[in-house]
Amino acid sequence: MLKMSQKLQHVLRVRQHFLIRLAIPVCAMLLLTCIYYRTPIMSDDVVAISTVSALVDHGTLAITPLRWLDNQVGIGANGPDGQLYSKYGIGQVILAAPLYALGKLIPAPPLVILNHQIADSQSGVLCALLLNVFVTGCLLWVIQVLVEEFWGMMGGVAAVAMVITTPIFVVGRTFGTELTTALCLTLAILACKRGRLPSGMFLVSLATLFRPSAIIFAACWIVLLINHPRRIWVQCAIALMLGIISIGLFNVARYGSPLISGYAQDLGFSLQSDGFLGFLISPGRSMLLFVPWVVLVAPMLLQAVRTRDQFSLALFLGIAVYIATHAMWREWFGGWAYGPRLLVPIIPVLALIVAPQLTKLRALPFLVTGLLIEQMTFSLNPFTVLGNAIHSGITLDQTIWSLEFNSLTLQWRALTTSRTDLMATLAMIVGFSFIIAFLFFSARREAKAISSDTPA
């Protein structure tokens, strides 16, 4: 009788896990569909959408009509044919092209920004910009699966913490490549967890089609491949080379040479303090401020070192190399952005690592802090706030380093001047607080149940 009761409890827990695992991404996608930005926000988004339109509407990757934008911010370079080509990866364009083509079925005028045509169809752009909404849903599903396989616990808290207490909440409404890169890296970790190291490396190579710098996350495999046969090493090396070759072929297609990427020949990497200090303590880019629960990584690192957990140590190495590489880049701050934009791809990896800590009471202050900070962007577009700051004479450095004019302070000031936006933000904070509380205490009960009895 006792065994039957334990089996029933186990079945109920499995069903609860599945329903929560399904409900979180579905609800996130529905929310993001309601609030996603229906026009390109950043110059990178404008370039990517214009490339999608060029590919679908005209069968080319050339974006020569955007030469006016290239003269302002440098979005690419001329190919051998004299046409302007984007310097950004092709992955986002390929994924968004079917959505754009689907949207084009609805008659609509061209998309025009600042008196310049960006795309041939507004309805196509509306559909293409939904890409990150779907990617966010997939990312939430994968991170829950990973947490359950990695730690043997419900992954809902980590998934929700990842999406509503970090800059992912903002990026999910844009057309940036951060989330597609994050999805590839997270799937790579899942493949490695299941013992498929070459498949994981291939997924890292796939991530380079969205963001070439993702290739540095391959540093994980230095640890993961220890004690594996030479055959696995060779397969992983081939998988890595596929990514490098793909980038080279894409460069040839645009610029006629595998060594020309559209970026300046001097990529601007140096051993500097600004990037490291910026990611650590700057008011506008600090990981401690925009992802408060990242401090919970410390006890997990100590635990991994103490237990010599090879998989966890590999993830820590990948994260450290990823952060260090971006910190040494001259544009470590990611331009006019909200938070540490360039580090968004590793936030899901951090959520996976700290998942056990997120179910402890000491995690609550960090979850609440992240919730309060990120929900300030719910009804008030932070890029609109930054745009207003530009027009008022505030400099980029001030939005990064100044206590008075950093992006968070500007966001709060703008929010408090609009009663409607402030009330909407408070409502979302209350609603999300209930969701986090439910998942938090459900995970704690689950942990106690697992420790008290093991299903037969």
Image (spheres, grey):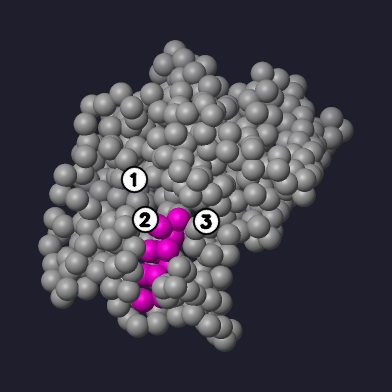
The magenta span reads 42-54
Q: Can you give x and y, in whole percent of width and height, for residue 226 in the image? A: 28, 29
* Local SS, label 3: loop
Amino acid marked by disc 2: Phe
User: Residue visible at 53% across and 49% down?
Assistant: 388
Image quadrant where one finds the N terminus: top right
Q: Nearer the viewer, residue 252 or 207?
A: 252
Asked whether residue 146 is in view, the answer is no
User: Residue visible at 39% across and 70% down?
Assistant: 50
Amino acid marked by disc 1: Ala
Asked whether residue 434 is in view, the answer is yes
Number of marks in picture = 3
Amino acid marked by disc 3: Thr
* Local SS, label 1: helix
Task: Examine the image and state in which quarter residue 143 appears.
Answer: top right
- Circles 2 and 1: CB atoms closer than 8 Å: yes
Spatial separation of the CA atoms under disc 2 and disc 3: 15 Å
Task: Examine the image and state in which quarter residue 376 appears.
Answer: top right
Mark 3, residue position = 174
Mark 1, residue position = 214
Q: Earlier in the sequence, mark 3 or mark 1?
A: 3
Mark 2, residue position = 210
* Local SS, label 2: loop
Look at the magenta stretch and give its main secondary structure: helix
Q: Can you give x and y, in whole percent of width and height, for residue 400 in the image? A: 44, 33
Tell me the crowding category of disc 3: few under 14, some 14 to 19, or many 20 or more residues within 10 angstroms, Cα based: many
Spatial separation of the CA atoms under disc 2 and disc 1: 8 Å
- Residue at the farthest right position: 1
Q: Can you give x and y, in whole percent of width and height, for residue 131 in the image? A: 52, 62
Circle 2 or circle 3, nearest the eye: 3
Tell me the crowding category of disc 1: few under 14, some 14 to 19, or many 20 or more residues within 10 angstroms, Cα based: many
